[in-house]
Image (cartoon, rainbow, N blue to C red):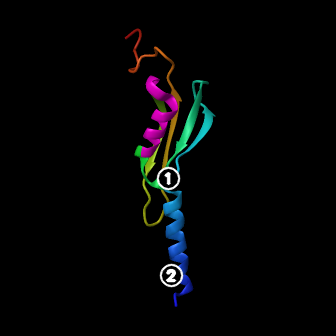
Amino acid sequence: MRSSTRWGIDVALLMMVMAGGCVTATPVITPSGAQGFSLNCSAMNDIGQCYKKAGELCGGNGYEIYDKNNKPASFWSAANQTLIVRCKQPGEPSVPVKVGF
């Protein structure tokens, strides 16, 4: 017979595995006023999944990162791994061009 504490740990681990395939993408307005996405991959504890989702959302035009938080989970705190991105428009340069310098 399993103790209730052990059962609770098993349920928590199962929930983490089930949530593991999730990257949430929430539409946001970026600081420049353009529409973008807030991508949260904290449940997976893998910032790489946020980059992958940004690529899927934005396609071949690429994206611009406005903010990034890559704090992995630790013993005392949960992961906080997010990206705020804006999809680039067709023909937009992939590298920012400095004008007047």
Real-space Cα distance between discs 2 and 1? 24 Å
> Residues in magenta?
49-62
In percent of the image, x 49 and y 23: which residue is there? 88
Magenta span dominant secondary structure: helix
Name the quadrant containing residue 27.
top right
Q: Are marks 2 and 1 in contact (CB under 8 Å)?
A: no
Give the mark nearer the N terminus: 2 vs 1: 2
In percent of the image, x 51 and y 55: which residue is there? 43
The picture places residue 54, in percent across and down from the top left corner, at 48, 35
Which dot, 2 or 1, sits closer to the camera?
1
The picture places residue 74, in percent across and down from the top left corner, at 42, 62
The picture places residue 97, in percent across and down from the top left corner, at 40, 15
* Left or right relative to 93: residue 24: right
Which quadrant holds the C terminus? top left
SS category of the residue bearing label 1: loop
* Residue 13 higher or lower than 34, as above or below: below
The local crowd at label 2, few if under 14, some if 14 to 19, many if 20 or more residues have their Cα within 10 Å, is few
* Residue 99 higher or lower than 25, as above or below: above
For residue 21, the mark is 1
Q: Residue furthest bottom?
A: 1
Q: Amino acid at mark 1?
A: Gly
In percent of the image, x 50 and y 29: which residue is there? 58
SS category of the residue bearing label 2: helix
Q: Is residue 23 visible?
A: yes
Q: Is residue 62 visible?
A: no
The local crowd at label 1, few if under 14, some if 14 to 19, many if 20 or more residues have their Cα within 10 Å, is few
Q: Which residue is mark 2?
A: 6
